[in-house]
Image (spheres, rainbow, N blue to C red):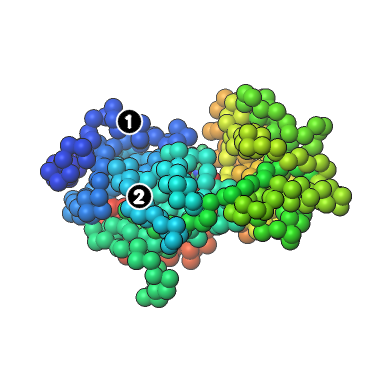
Amino acid sequence: MTDAQAQLIAEAEQRLGPKGVITDPKEIEPWISDWRGRVHGAAPAMIAPSSTEEVAEIVRLAAKHRVPLVPQGGNTGMAAGATPPADGSAILLSMRRMNRIRSISAENRIAIAEAGVVLATLHDAAHEIGMRFPLTLGARGSCTIGGLTSTNAGGTQVLRFGTMRSLVAGVEAVLPDGSIHSGLSGLKKDNRGYSLDQLLIGAEGTLGVVTAVALKLVPAVAARAVAWAAVDNPERALDLLRFLEARTGSVEGFELVPQDSLELVLKHVPNTRAPLLGEHKWHVLVEATTADGQHEIGAALERLLGAALQQGIIGDAVLASNDAQAEAFWKLRDTISEAERAEGQTLAHDISVTVADMPRFIVEAAAEVERRFPGVIASGFGHLGDGNIHFHVRAGAHAAPDWYESEGEEITRLVDDLVTAAGGSISAEHGIGQLKRAEFARLAPPGRIHALRAIKQALDPFGIMNPGKLVP
Ligand SMILES: Cc1cc2nc3c(=O)[nH]c(=O)nc-3n(C[C@H](O)[C@H](O)[C@H](O)COP(=O)(O)OP(=O)(O)OC[C@H]3O[C@@H](n4cnc5c(N)ncnc54)[C@H](O)[C@@H]3O)c2cc1C
C-alpha cells in the first residue's frame, strides 16, 4: 500500500466509520475478479459510501491524494470494467450500500433509485404499484442501477423500449473534482448545452460516480404470449419479425437460436426439452405483451404465426400454453452460454451490425471463421431484432487445452475485423472495459478516440476515475 493510499483510507475511515471502509483481504476477495473469472485484480481497500455526500467526500479525497477509484455495482459486467488493476494501485468504490429507492410514482411514471439498487428489487417495487421497469437481463438478481447506467445495458426488451439510454430520465453523479451533478429534476426540456447525463450513461465509471438515476416506468404487463418458431435461416427469422411488426405493436422479445445451440442446451442443461418435433436449422423465441387486460394476446400471436406458416416464412411454431412453458422456452435461450461452457472452450463476441445486414453477417462471418480456423464452430444467437447477436466461436472437440491463448486472440481479431468491415460495433451491449480496450484502439476511427481522450482529460485531469478502462 502506498502512503497516499494509507492516508486516503485513514481519512475515509474518519468520515465514513468502519462500516464504510473494508481492508480485510478476505472480504475484498470476491470483488476483485470479473464475473467470468478471467481477469484478476487487487485492491488494498474497498470503500462503501452510503450517501451521495459520502461519495463526494471520497472522490475529493481521491483527487487530493491522486489515488484512483474503481466504481463497482454488482460486478456482473462482461468487460471487466469493475475489476481493479492487478498492481493494487486503485481502491474499489462499492456502491452497494446506496440501495434506496428514493421515490416511485405510477402517476409520474418515474422511479428515482440509488446506484446500488439491484435491478430485481426495482422490478418488484414497480410491480407493487402496477408498473414495470422495462429492462431485464440474466444478471437481474445482482446487477445494479449504477452499473446498468454506466454500461448503457440492453437486455431482451430493447426491441420495444430501447437500452438504458432511452429509459434514463436523469442522472445524479459525483464528478471527478468531487462536485455533485444533479440531473434528477424531471425537466422534459433542458437545453443548457452538453448533456452530462448522456455523457455519464455508458461512461463505465471513467467520468464520475453515478449516485442515483431517474428511471422511466411503463404500465405493468396484463398478459403475455410466448412462442417458439422454426425458420430455415436468419433471413427468414428477420422476415418473421417484419411480418409481426407490420401487424402488431406488442412484440417485445425476439431472440434467434441456432439448432446447434439448442442441441447443446438439451445436452447439458437439466429439465430442458425441444419445443418442436423434428430437426430445424434455426429457431426464434417470440414474446408479445400487452398492458390491456382485455386484449387476447395469445390468440392474436397464434393467428399471426399461422399466417406466417401459410406464407412459408416459418416451418413450424408452438405457443406456450401457460407461464411455466413460457419460462421453459426462455430457459432454452438463457442457458446457451452455460451449455457452451459445459461443452468446452468458447469465445464470446457481443457485436452489432444493422438489423438488415445481420442475417447475412451471421452466415458469412461464421463460414469465414470456420474456413480460416478449421475445427472451430461459429454461430450467432440473441437479439436479432436489435442487430445485436452474441457471435460465439467454440473450440471444437479436438482443440488443445490452451486454445484460448493459442488461437483465441487471432479469432477475435478476425471477428472484429469482419464486424468493422460491415460497419458494425465490436461492443453492442457490454461496453469496452479492459477486455476490449486494445481492439477498440486498433479499430475505432481516430476522431472517435481523440474525442474520448479529450473529454476524459477535461473532466478527470488527474485520471482518478477508473483508469485503464474504456478510453484507450
Ligand atoms: C448472466 C448475465 C447476463 C447479462 N446479460 C446482459 C444483457 O442481456 N445485456 C446487457 O447489456 N448486459 C448484460 N450483462 C452484463 C451487464 O453489463 C451487467 O449485468 C450490468 O449492466 C452491470 O451492472 P453491475 O451493477 O454488475 O456493474 P459492474 O459490473 O459492477 O460495473 C460495470 C461497469 O460500470 C461501472 N460502474 C458500476 N457502478 C457504477 C456507478 N455507480 N457509477 C459509475 N460507474 C459504475 C464499473 O466501473 C464498470 O466499468 C449480463 C451479465 C450477466 C452476468
Residue 45 lies, with reference to residue 294, above or below; the image says above
Q: What kind of residue is marked 2?
A: Ile
Q: Ligand 1 is located in which of the four quadrants?
A: top left
Distance from mark 1 CB to nearest ligand 1 atom below 8 Å: no
Residue 42 appears in view: yes
Q: Which residue in the structure is indicated by mark 1?
A: 29
The mark nearer the N terminus, 1 or 2, is: 1
Q: Nearer the viewer, residue 183 or 153?
A: 183
Up the image or down, 420 lies above or below 363; here it is below
Q: Nearer the viewer, residue 348 or 26?
A: 26
How far across and how far down the image is residue 101, in percent? Answer: 35, 50
Residue at 14%, 46% in the rendered image: 15
Q: From the viewer's perspective, is 220 left or right of 189?
A: right
Q: Position of residue 352 (x, y in %)?
A: 61, 53
Rendering coords of residue 43 (x, y %): 28, 37
Q: Is residue 33 left or right of residue 179?
A: right
Dot label at residue 137: none
Q: Which quarter of the figure has residue 105?
A: bottom left
Q: Position of residue 405 (x, y in %)?
A: 53, 33
Q: Can residue 201 be seen by looking at this rendering?
A: no
